[in-house]
Amino acid sequence: MTTTLATEETRVATITTGLDRLRRSLHTGSRIAAPYRAAAEPAWHSSYVAPAAERPPVTARMASFGYRERELHGRADLVDDLAMTGPVRLLTPDGAAALRGICQNLEASAVHNDYVVSRRLRGVESLSPFVHAMVRDPVFLDTVSRLVGVPLIPHPLRDAGVQINYYEAAADASRAPLVAKWHLDGMNYVFTMTLSDHAEHQGGDYIYYRGHPRDFASRREEITAQGARHPDVHIAPFQHVGDTMFTRGSRVYHAVTPVTRGHRITLAVSLFCPLLGDQDENRFWHSAPDDGLVRTLNNWNALRRAVRRPASYCRREDIPIRPLARRSAARD
Ligand SMILES: O=C(O)CCC(=O)C(=O)O
Ligand SMILES: [Fe+2]
């Protein structure tokens, strides 16, 4: 009985594809559930970026997820084979506390959507001046670029770029629990920062499949049924407010198990490599179910323009152009 219960608690479905995405894309609901008072936010400061991280406990290359050399991103002069690293602290404790307060205040604006993450707020850069300033701060960008080994800047697909995910126990047993279904992100470079201490919730683990998506597809039934108990499914070691994991979201299947007690908030910051823009893995039909067709069309045009002319994108958006920093993540 205990075993069955534990398995149930980490069981998460996989997102839908095909016609269901089209059906979901036709919604015209509001992007935010309530207006947000940005003027009440504290100001962002560069000094909120934490000093360079120590060697993170987890560092995995694409090869250990079953990817072959020819499948990797990058180009001859730019290796881009990091699958996952962390947890690291990108912000100081004060910076993470300020961000947590902001994301708590933004919760009233979040919307329900059972496509991937049950409850979330997209396009946070356009709502929060703090987050807008953070993701284009040269010190912040240098830190994340060094961690991955490629230059990273704010993502042109604005609604998907920065989002906040909110999880809590379902109000009653008849409601579906709040989760992130098994999925690949559209984004290549994703930094997931927890803004909750793990002691504040039960469940709500970020789990990932250590293997190739091709194998995930053929083993889907057993992986979704067993969740965290599956031998090739691992739990990302988030512990404290501010802990951040880098993942190559577009190539590593992941999910968040149901929260059974308390609350969990995460900020997902996805970035863009202007030198490898043509390898961006976003797909129109991956974003449309969340953002609706019209917004996705506009976002899509902005992405295509930035891929073609990254320097003009940076100028238009006031994004600092940085020299290429050397990678700091340890090789495994
Ligand atoms: O909330 C998390 O820990 C991860 C959510 C996620 O996978 C996503 O936002 O794409
Ligand atoms: Fe994700």
Image (spheres, rainbow, N blue to C red):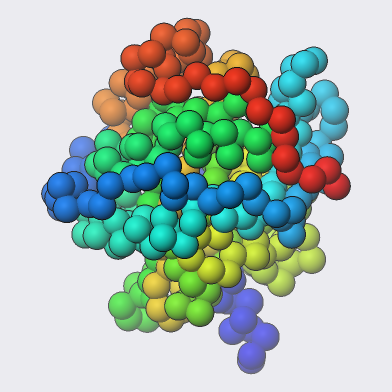
Which residue is pictured at 65% across the width and 35% down the height?
146
Query: Residue 207 location, x and y as percent?
Result: 63, 61
Query: Residue 61 location, x and y as percent?
Result: 79, 42
Say whether residue 82 is left or right of residue 113.
right
Q: Is residue 139 visible?
A: yes
Q: Is residue 198 above or below residue 18?
A: below
Which residue is pictured at 26% across the width and 52% down the height?
42
In which quadrant is the N terminus drawn? bottom right
Which residue is pictured at 41% across the width and 60% down the height?
94
Say whether residue 155 is left or right of residue 148.
left
Which residue is pictured at 52% across the width and 74% down the height?
198
As rendered, which of 297 and 78 lies closer to the eye? 78
Going by the picture, which residue comes out furthest to the front?
47
Q: How many marks?
A: 0
Say whether residue 325 is left or right of residue 257.
right
Query: Residue 13 location, x and y as percent?
Result: 54, 59
Query: Residue 181 location, x and y as percent?
Result: 51, 56
